[in-house]
Amino acid sequence: MIYNNPIAYGVDVTPAILRTLEDVEQIICIKEESGDIRRVTDLYNEFGDRFAVFCGVDDLILESLALGVTGWVSGMTNAWPEECVRIFELGQTGKFAEALQLYRIMTPAFHLDTSVKLVQYIKLAEHLVYGAPEWTRAPRLPLAGEERERVVSVINNTIASLSKRNSEAA
């Protein structure tokens, strides 16, 4: 799997670069994380089904599914596995109106997965959702102050919105 995350790695694996790697049999998949949703269609137009294309940005999963991605490398799935699998399954089966309701609830938390502190944010979400330890290994530093409060607020609002949704569905 090629990880195309130009924001984190400083290199954008464009279709032109992939063209030079097209004959490498070991490359079977692309994690598309450029943040440019048009890239999904560009990859399919350029390579057809040569590469499986995975969404690598949590807050673009529904859009990516509409464009035909076959997988999702997700951070927030660690905190909300059932909800993320549900969004993915609904999108894959074309039930976008139903997926959209859940996606809109999850999107503020999904935005946390696009930060350079995504590991700390995901660990904090895991902690608040189901009690997992929130610590991270060095050199990552713990969240503190206003930043931590903001992230806790986003996560708690997501938890409350999901709880309300689930109680209304029951």
Image: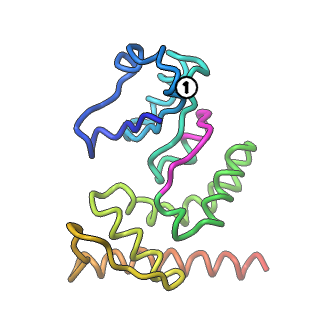
Residue 19 found in image quarter: top left
Q: Is residue 164 left or right of residue 37?
A: right
Q: What is the three-letter code of the residue carrying label 1?
A: Phe
Which residue is identified by label 1?
51
Q: How far across and down, in percent of the image, does residue 163 sit?
A: 62, 81
Mark 1 crowdedness (10 Å alpha carbons): few <14, some 14-19, many ≥20: some
Does residue 120 belong to the magenta stretch? no
Please state the extent of the stretch shown in magenta in the rendering: 64-74
Residue at image position (36%, 16%) is 16
Residue at image position (34%, 41%) is 5
> In front here: 77 or 136?
136
Count of marks overlaid on the render: 1
Residue at image position (35%, 55%) is 114
Q: How far across and down, in percent of the image, does residue 23 sit?
A: 48, 14
Secondary structure category for the residue under label 1: loop
Q: How far across and down, in percent of the image, does residue 145 sit?
A: 21, 83
Q: Which residue is farthest front?
A: 26
What colour scheme was applied to this rendering of the protein? rainbow
Does residue 67 belong to the magenta stretch? yes
Q: How far across and down, in percent of the image, does residue 4 sit?
A: 37, 36
Residue at image position (44%, 29%) is 39
Q: Which residue is farthest bottom?
A: 131
Q: Is residue 27 left or right of residue 48?
A: left
Quadrant containing the C terminus in the rendered view: bottom right
| Vertical arrangement, residue 109 with respect to residue 3, above or below | below
